[in-house]
Image: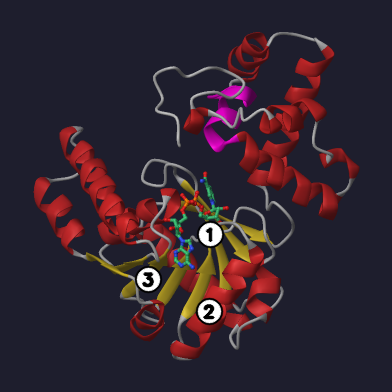
């Protein structure tokens, strides 16, 4: 199964990073989004991140230019289905939206095309079952920021076949990533553990066990975590974290019941770094309107 063209659906936070590493891996990239402005923003982000790579001596100027030239943007989902050998979907985390995207894509794409979802926690098997290609459907869970983070969780749905798994691992490696293979279950490995640690940290904060700063410091200096759980929650977004916890609570049980303080912070609009305030305040971050 030879993969030459990769379509990335959704040119947001994750989509632009996936397009960046795919282009650096030598693939032709079609970056698709329904919002015109997202195309311009994504190309500017990719160009700026590639330039930083050159400044840090991680890649040559010629490689960065060639990578950027391999990225084309489009609003046309059916074109992505027709032209790509692998489609990596990174549209917002709403199952009804993803199913709608896959229905259109499935009609346009030839039988050999592999579909991969970058979902954080949703069921690969459920999305695969809505297409005519459940054997060629897989999860590729990238991490933020994609061009920096080393791991891709490769998530095998119930019907995913070995050829699809092998081709996906090869693509991830050409993107410069390490992979782990995960049998589908809610939250895979990383979101499942991370949500639990984060939820427990909120519980400790609510109980007054220690301050947020000291809980973060304890995990960084005592357990060697590169970020504290509250720094991480602020980066991910408290609203995003809450919706992941709600899903894991529903599917895995009581250990994931979202903490009350986290719920209150979301209600108060303390959504994290993206709005300038979460567990901590970020006066320098421009609040979203
Ligand atoms: N942000 C993270 O840290 C992170 C990490 C791993 C996985 N994910 C997953 O990646 C996916 C995307 O998340 P994100 O953070 O990049 O979201 P985002 O909101 O930054 O970007 C989503 C993009 O999809 C576009 N979009 C909306 N509807 C579309 C459609 N029908 N067709 C094409 N594009 C459409 C939006 O215009 C937007 O540009 C989600 O499934 C999320 O759970 C996110």
Disc 1 to disc 3, C-alpha distance? 13 Å
- From the top left corner, tell me how far across and down residue 140 is, in percent: 53, 61
Q: Give 226 or 180, whichever is nearer the viewer.
A: 226
Disc 3 to disc 2, C-alpha distance? 19 Å
Disc 1 to disc 2, C-alpha distance? 19 Å
Q: Main secondary structure of the magenta part?
A: helix
Q: Earlier in the sequence, mark 3 or mark 2?
A: 3
Find disc 3 in the rendering and name its residue: 7
Find disc 1 in the rendering and name its residue: 118
Give the left or right position of residue 55, taking residue 39 as reference: left
Please state, as top left, top right, bottom left or bottom right, where the C terminus lies in the image.
Answer: top left
- From the top left corner, tell me how far across and down residue 130 is, in percent: 65, 81
The secondary element bearing badge 2 is classed as helix
- From the top left corner, tell me how far across and down residue 252 is, in percent: 84, 51
Please state, as top left, top right, bottom left or bottom right, where the N terminus lies in the image.
Answer: bottom left
Q: Which mark is residue 163?
A: 2
Q: Quadrant of residue 15?
A: bottom left
Q: Earlier in the sequence, mark 1 or mark 3?
A: 3
- From the top left corner, tell me how far across and down residue 49 is, in percent: 26, 42
Q: Which residues are magenta?
A: 225-237
The secondary element bearing badge 3 is classed as strand
Q: Earlier in the sequence, mark 1 or mark 2?
A: 1
């Amino acid at each position: 199964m030879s993969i030459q063209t990769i379509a990335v659906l959704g040119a947001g936070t994750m989509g632009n990073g996936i397009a960046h590493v795919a282009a650096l891996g030598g693939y032709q990239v079609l970056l698709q989004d329904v919002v015109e402005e997202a195309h311009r923003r994504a190309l500017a982000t990719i160009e700026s991140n590639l330039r930083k790579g050159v400044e840090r001596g991680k890649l040559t100027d010629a490689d960065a230019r060639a990578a950027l030239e391999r990225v084309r943007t489009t609003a046309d989902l059916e074109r992505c289905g027709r032209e790509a050998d692998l489609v990596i979907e990174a549209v917002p985390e709403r199952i009804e939206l993803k199913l709608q995207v896959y229905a259109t894509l499935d009609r346009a794409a030839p039988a050999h095309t592999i579909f991969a979802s970058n979902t954080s926690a949703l069921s690969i098997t459920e999305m695969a079952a809505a297409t005519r290609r459940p054997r060629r459907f897989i999860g590729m869970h990238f991490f933020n920021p994609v061009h920096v983070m080393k791991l891709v969780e490769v998530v095998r749905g119930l019907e995913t076949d070995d050829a699809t798994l092998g081709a996906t691992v090869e693509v991830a490696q050409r993107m410069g990533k390490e992979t782990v293979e995960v049998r589908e279950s809610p939250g895979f490995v990383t979101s499942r553990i991370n949500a639990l640690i984060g939820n427990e940290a909120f519980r400790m904060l609510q109980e007054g066990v220690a301050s947020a700063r000291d809980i973060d410091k304890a995990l960084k200096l005592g357990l060697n975590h590169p970020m504290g759980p509250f720094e991480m929650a602020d980066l991910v977004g408290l609203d995003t974290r809450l919706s992941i916890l709600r899903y894991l609570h529903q599917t895995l049980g009581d250990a994931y019941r979202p903490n009350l303080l986290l719920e209150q912070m979301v209600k108060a609009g303390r959504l994290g770094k993206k709005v300038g305030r979460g567990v901590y305040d970020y006066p320098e971050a421009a609040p979203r309107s």
